[in-house]
Amino acid sequence: MQMAVGLIKKSWLLALIFLFWQMAITFGTPGKMTPTPLGAGKGLLELAQTGALLKALIISLTRVFWGFGAALLLGVSLGILMGGVKAVERWLDPIIESLRPIPPIAWVPLAIIWFGLGDTAPAFIVALAAFFYILINTIAATKNVDRQLIEAAHTLGASRWLIVREVIIPSALPLILVGARLGMGAAWMSIIAAELTAGSRVWAGQLEAGIGELMYRFFAYEPNLNYVVSCMMVIGFIALAIDGVFRLLRRSLIRWRP
Amino acid sequence: MNLLREKAQSALSYFRTMTLFVILWYLLSRWIENRLLLPSPPEVAGALWDLLSEQHFLLDIFISLKRLILGYLVAGAVGIPLGFLLGLSRQAESIVSPVVEVLRPISPIAWIPIAMFLFGVGDGLAIYIIFYGASFQFLLNTIAGVKSIDRRLFEVSLTVGANRWLIIRDVILPGTLPLIIVAGRLAMASAWMSIIAAELVGAPNGLGFKIEWAHSMFMSESIVAGMATIGILGYLSDLLLRWIGRKAIPWRKTSYGLG
């Protein structure tokens, strides 16, 4: 009972907004296409039932997985290198800083030309988006590692590889995880953007569709704005789930830091 | 004097790396020999020159910047005051926060179809998407900024007999300012992403549209030229915000946020 009361107290404004929205549509004179909360909820169930939602989610998440994985691998290794070796940073920094201001979505036309319409292009955009966050945080994390720990390990005769594995990576892990979490957030946003902008071309060819492309389909090809809102809800939910996973990850990986 | 030398050194290393990059790019483009796949540096430079001398492109730049600035300023005008309110009043926060938490995970770009339905194609759509994304940055960071102020400063100022207006002006505002500046830069980054995405899909003009147009004409060199323009403008806008940040917070020597 206590929990229910708490829940009501927290969400009454939200419920009010939904109610108002539904009422405005039901009693007003909107176009036939206007989405409603009930319609969107119903759409969610329908989409889930036909399996279209699940299929699209799997496709999108797979692309994110590959893109983020590549970004993580490249970003962490390059980050440690650039953070640890001043010369590398001095050489690479200008090109990194020149590419970084370009929004990942601006790469979509080029990516489609390079990789065609399929999984690689969205994964590439995801990798771009996540890479910069991961890189910058890893560089900062590596620079923050206590010099004395490195020197101590050196004195004890540790090889360079051992130092990286046992000193640098554990010390840098908290900030690297921050970069990973930010990168993941950017990754999920970018996949939606990339799939949405590619949507117009994908449906011409009936290729594999992620959730962004699905949303575009329900806007342009088989207009159903309720389905569009359903997709938006799913997108938001996945974003929260991803963030939750990362928080769990942080707690389990960094047990020695409060 | 030392500062000048440092700047000269960083400019030198910038030129060094970029020259190497352009050379490698040129060699790669000659090896691939496919203008569509990888336009060479001279081709991109030529495309950039052509675009810049064409009035239409300058108009596109102006339109994009106009939408960007409008959306950004409105986002600040809404996000910052609301952030102050929610940061200072526990009650207000508990009422509004569930709505914010539900909307926050939905990225601004996911709103494009609905926004297109509501606003049609063009200015309204772009400004809404920019506003949506940027206002969250302003809101959340201002709340964090307000909450980061040491509570004891409040108590001290009350003890000294300051009235509410004085507290707002001399404690709350300066204390929140650093994070508002951070918010400004994050909001700008979000705004750039929003405008390009919105224009790629839903605008008959603007920079994003230009890139997509070049794409449909298979003019890769123009695509890259457009991307470079966006990158330069994005970099300049961040530079501007960093400068504003330094002027607004002269008492802080350390740089906040994204460094």
Image (cartoon, rainbow, N blue to C red):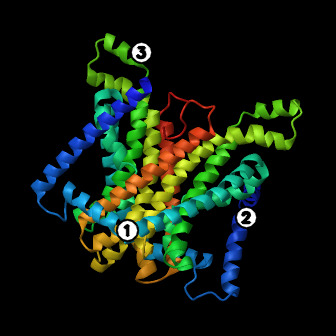
- Which x, y percent locates residue B32? 12, 57
Q: Mark 3 Cα within 10 Å, few/some/many (few <14, many 20+)? A: few
Reading the image, the residue beneath label 3 is A148
A189 vs B182, left or right, is left
Q: Is residue A140 above or below residue A61?
A: above
Residue A192 located left or right of residue A42: left
> In which quadrant is the N terminus of chain B drawn?
top left
Mark 2 — residue? A13
* Residue displayed at 39% across by 28% down: B6
Residue type at tag 3: Gln
Image x and y of residue A230, in percent? 52, 72
Q: Marks 3 and 1, how far apart in space?
A: 55 Å
Q: Are the residues flagged by discs 2 and 3 in contact, CB closer than 8 Å?
A: no
Of pointers 2 and 3, the one earlier in the residue sequence = 2
Instruction: Residue under label 1, please give it.
Output: B57
- The reply to whether the C-beta atoms of the residues labelled 2 and 1 are less than 8 Å apart is no
Q: Secondary structure at mark 3?
A: helix
Disc 1 residue type (three-letter):
Phe
Q: What kind of residue is marked 2?
A: Leu
